[in-house]
Image (cartoon, rainbow, N blue to C red):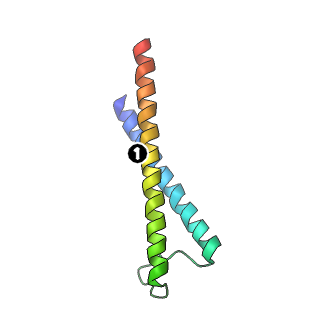
Amino acid sequence: MNVVFKLLGVGMSVGAGFVGTKLIDFLWEKITGEAPPKSKDGLENTLRSALVFAIISGAVSTTIQVLTNRSTQKAIERFAKSRDLT
């Protein structure tokens, strides 16, 4: 059963990361009116906008990862406790 929980945690983390990335891209376009500075040859973007985007997306990505891992661990602990009671 541990393998199932690990796979579920990985799946949730990947899914949450995908949703977070799309959310950041959407909000960046709405707020700045420009596409996110992600392209390899994006020399038309200023260094400031690229750095701000990188900081924001990194912070959101890390937060999502931490929250997903914590909630998965709590769910595993609750399942293990309820399993021990029966």
Q: Secondary structure at mark 1?
A: helix
User: Residue 4's spot in the image, x, y percent?
Assistant: 39, 34
Image-based side of 31 in relation to 19, left or right = right
User: Residue 68's spot in the image, x, y percent?
Assistant: 46, 45
Image-based side of 68 in relation to 24, left or right = left
The residue that appears at 47% across and 80% down in the rendered structure is 48
The residue that appears at 44% across and 68% down in the rendered structure is 55
The residue that appears at 63% across and 78% down in the rendered structure is 33
| Nearest to the observer: residue 35 or residue 47 | 47
User: Residue 69's spot in the image, x, y percent?
Assistant: 41, 43
Q: Is residue 14 visible?
A: no
User: Residue 25's spot in the image, x, y percent?
Assistant: 55, 67
Q: Which residue is mark 1?
A: 10
Where is 49 relative to 12, above or below? below
Where is 48 relative to 3, above or below? below
Image-based side of 85 in relation to 32, left or right = left
Where is 48 relative to 54, above or below? below
- The amino acid pointed to by label 1 is Val
Q: Residue furthest bottom?
A: 44
Disc 1 crowd rating (10 Å Cα; few below 14, some 14-19, many 20+) is some
Where is 21 relative to 8, above or below? below
Number of marks in picture: 1
Q: Is residue 13 visible?
A: yes
